[in-house]
Amino acid sequence: MNVNDKLEYIPIFTTPIQQYNFKNDIEHTLLYSQIKKIQEQDKGRKVSNSGGWQSNDRWIKNEEQSELKKLMLIINACVQNFWVHINANVDEYNISIDNYWLNINTPNSYNKPHTHGGFVSGVYYVNAPENSGEICFQHPAGELQSHLWPNYLFKDIANNEIACNTWKFTPNMGVLYLFPSWLSHSVEQNLSKENRCSLSFNTMVLKNDNR
């Protein structure tokens, strides 16, 4: 008897991450110039970033930069798609982008492990030179998972969706990642000689009569 013939695999507690590519839909040179213009007027803040620049919070309704506003409306449509795909209660609740902020990671800068507020969060890459740092998502069970399921017990751990304690994505211009706001993540050090630029955001959920 082959026990695999009796097997039913049940992937409970999956972590939904969506990836989109808008490389050919956004004028990234224009977008970056608009972000640099904002940087000139915004001293920025330090949150999870070690080095580099992070803007203060921004909102779509107040956005004056044309390409940036265009991008945020596209991202908001992706957020709606994420909401539907996770089988959210769309009859009673809606989701939309809340705050967003801009990031310029200069050479040698990085972002420490952190989570976001809100329901769904995401990052969009305006530019991403080679070796400018991968985004790393940590297993939700944290140290307990890595202690009881150490990497050395598994083959090809970097690509093992079941057993890995960290999953990495290499950033590319025009790529958007959406993920649960509770999912801890970090960004590796920018080892290139150029800036990496991205946009991050949070979302909010409201009852439909509060649109």
Image (tube, helix red, strand yellow):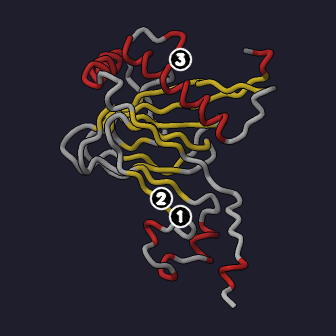
**Looking at this view, is 187 or 23 the one in front?**
23
Q: Mark 3 to mark 1: distance in Å? A: 35 Å
**Looking at this view, is 107 or 181 the one in front?**
181
Q: Secondary structure at mark 3?
A: loop
* Quarter of the rendering containing residue 142: bottom right
Residue at which label 1 appears? 161
Q: Quadrant of the C terminus?
A: top right
Q: Secondary structure at mark 2?
A: strand
Report the side of 195 relative to 74 (left or right). Answer: left
Observer able to see residue 53: no
- Residue at 62% in and 52% down: 15
- Residue at 33% in and 21% down: 35
**Is the residue under label 2 in contact with that under label 1 (CB below 8 Å)?**
yes
Residue at which label 2 appears? 167
Identify residue type, mark 2.
Answer: Trp
**Is the residue under label 2 in contact with that under label 3 (CB below 8 Å)?**
no
Instruction: Looking at the image, tell me whether mark 3 or mark 2 is earlier in sequence order.
Output: 3
Identify residue type, mark 1.
Answer: Glu
Placement of 157 over or under 67, stated as above or below: below
Q: Position of residue 41 (x, y in %)?
A: 35, 15
Identify residue type, mark 3.
Answer: Trp
Q: How many dots with numbers? A: 3
Residues packed near mark 1 inside 10 Å, few (<14), some (14 to 19) or many (20 plus): few
- Residue at 57% in and 45% down: 115
Placement of 24 over or under 196, stated as above or below: above
Observer able to see residue 38: yes
Q: Residue furthest bottom?
A: 1
Q: Position of residue 11 (x, y in %)?
A: 67, 62
Residue at which label 3 appears? 59
Residues packed near mark 3 inside 10 Å, few (<14), some (14 to 19) or many (20 plus): some
**Is the residue under label 1 in contact with that under label 3 (CB below 8 Å)?**
no
